[in-house]
Each structure stands twice: as C-alpha cells, then as structure tokens.
Amino acid sequence: MPEHDLYALFVRPIHASGLRYLVAGSVASVYYSEPRLTIDVDIPLWLGREDAAKIRAIFLEPEYYLPPEDVIVSEVQRECRGHFNAIHLESGLKADFYPAGAKDNTFLWAWENKRTVQLGDGRAAHLAPPEYVVLWKLIYFEEGRSEKHLRDVRSLMRHHPEVRESEFLKQQRDEKRLEKAWATVGLG
C-alpha cells in the first residue's frame, strides 16, 4: 500500500485549481529547517464566497471529509481567522484551511513574497515565506502555549538567521503585541 503524502493529498489539488494558497505552519517550517512529524498541513488561501463550491469539488466524498458548503461560506465571511479542514479518510491526514480576505495584510504580503518550489515529483508548490511562518508560529504560541511552535521558530531561525532582521516581522510583532512570545523564543 503506498504511503500517503500531505502534498499529494492536499497541496497538489489546490495548486492545480488555480486558487491562491500558501503552504505554511509545520510543513513550511520543516521545508525551511529541520524535519519533524506532522499529520496536517496549514494552508492559508484566498477564498471568496463563490469558492466554497470549488473547494468541495476539489476534495470529493467519499475520499475526503469536508464541512457542508454553508459552513465553509460562513468561515470565508469571517472578518478574520476563519478556519475549516479537509480530512483524507483513509489516512487520517488533514489540511487546515485558513481563508484570507482583503483585510488580511499578512496573507497579501506573504503571497507577494511566496517561494514557489519544485517538489520531488517535479510539481510546484507555493510556500509561505519564512517570516510569515515565524509570525503565525508566534501567534499560535501566544494562544496555546505549545512548545512545538517555539521549537519550529528556533529551528527556522538557525537555518535562516536573516529573518530576525525582517521589517515585516518586526512590524507585525509590534502590531500584534508579540514581544513576550518573541522573548520566550530567546533569540534577541
């Protein structure tokens, strides 16, 4: 039986759809730094209300679970921090989707600064830039205090020390009041 792959199950179909998306979270952190186990992929994406049906057409039942279309539309319409997921039922792997809207200046910046990479099979994927990954790891650490976020940030910073000087990251840390989380990382 072939091993299931987060890229094959979730990223390829989204990429092929033409939707604006970014691979973020631990999968992006692993790409930029050191391997660690994860069973999900975080995918911020630009979605309008009309795209809910498109998402449901990409991840079809019975292979995938998706929430009902009205739930997806409701999450897309949130002012900020909408969220829904798709689960590949055979493997239990999942994608957490974070719909971005015009008010999400972090997504807009990340989209403009994305890294398009070629995967082992020659297909492309859009990765969020390291600064965006660090920003959201800090936000999620503030919210849940999970050490995995700090480990990911430290690892990413060891491999990409230039991120520490990023004006985007400095501005967002100030704007989102992440000084304590940044100090907890212990990188100055």
Image: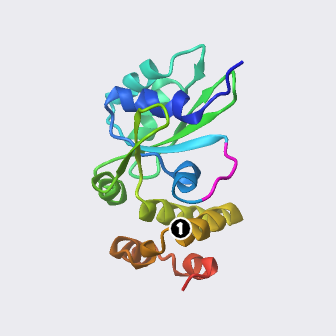
Visible in this render: residue 74?
yes
Residue designated by label 1: 159
Left or right, 25 with respect to 167, comes to right
Give the answer, above or below, for where 92 lies relative to 136: above
Q: Residue 131: horizontal and vertical position, in percent?
A: 43, 65
Instruction: Give the amino acid at mark 1.
Output: His
Give the answer, above or below, for where 56 lies relative to 187: above
Does the stretch in magenta take in 128?
Answer: no
Left or right, 56 with respect to 67, comes to left
Q: Residue furthest top?
A: 62
Residue range (magenta): 34-38
Q: Residue at x 69, y 21 (%)?
A: 90
Classify residue 113 by image quadrant. Answer: bottom left
Residue in front for this viewpoint, 125 or 23:
125
Residue in front for this viewpoint, 119 or 164:
119
Residue in front for this viewpoint, 131 or 143:
131
Left or right, 11 with respect to 111, comes to right
